[in-house]
Amino acid sequence: MPEFLYNNKLYYNPVEFAMDRIGGTWKIPILWRLQNRVMRYGELKKDIPHITDKMLTSQLRELEKEGFVHREVYAVVPPKVEYSITAKGKRTIPVIETIRNYGLSLMTEENIIE
C-alpha cells in the first residue's frame, strides 16, 4: 500500500493509521470500560488506575473527535457529563480482545502469569 497523508500526517500503512486512532496507554482501557455501559468522568477516573485528570480529559477528547466515544452533557447543576461508546468504537472491541488475548499468551510464555 502506498503512503498517504491524513490530517497533515504521513502514514505508511493501515496498521499505523489504526494504532494512531486507538493506540497508546489509555485509549484502549477507556474503550474497554465503555463497551457495555455509560460512564461519568469520575467513574472512569476511579476505574483506570494511574491515569491523570489531564490525560483522561485529553484521551476522551481525542476519542470523541475521532468518533469512537460520545459525550453527553446534561444541563443540570452540578453539571453532568456521560461518556458512551459509539458504533465505530464498538468495532474496536474485537480488535482489543485479540490484542489482549495475545498479550495474555505472551505473559504466560514469560511466566508473568500462570
Image: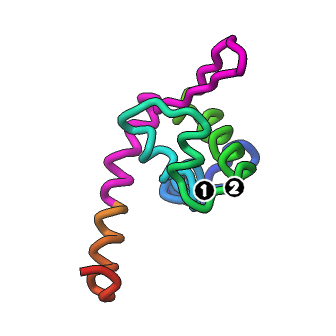
Residue 16 part of the magenta segment: no
Residue at mark 2: 52
Q: In this view, does 83 lie above or below 23?
A: above
Q: Residue furthest top?
A: 75
User: Residue 66, percent across and down?
Assistant: 60, 36
User: Residue 3, percent across and down?
Assistant: 60, 56
Q: Residue at x 72, y 15 (%)?
A: 77
Near-viewer residue (91 or 101) = 101
- Visible residue check, residue 107: yes
User: Residue 48, percent across and down?
Assistant: 53, 54
Applied colour scheme:
rainbow
Near-viewer residue (66 or 109) = 109
Q: Which of marks 1 and 2 is in front?
A: 2
Near-viewer residue (21 or 36) = 36
Mark 1 neighbour class, 10 Å CA radius: few under 14, some 14 to 19, many 20 or more: few
Query: Number of numbered discs present?
Result: 2
Q: In this view, does 33 lie above or below 64?
A: below
Per the image, label 1 sits on a secondary structure element best described as: loop
Image quadrant of residue 105?
A: bottom left
Q: Which residue is drawn at 55% across and 30% down?
A: 83
Per the image, label 2 sits on a secondary structure element best described as: loop
Q: How far apart are marks 1 and 2 (CA)?
A: 35 Å
Residue at mark 1: 3
Q: Is residue 87 above or below residue 30?
A: above
Where does the magenta region start and end? Answer: 71-98
Could you tell whether 39 is left or right of 79 in the image?
left
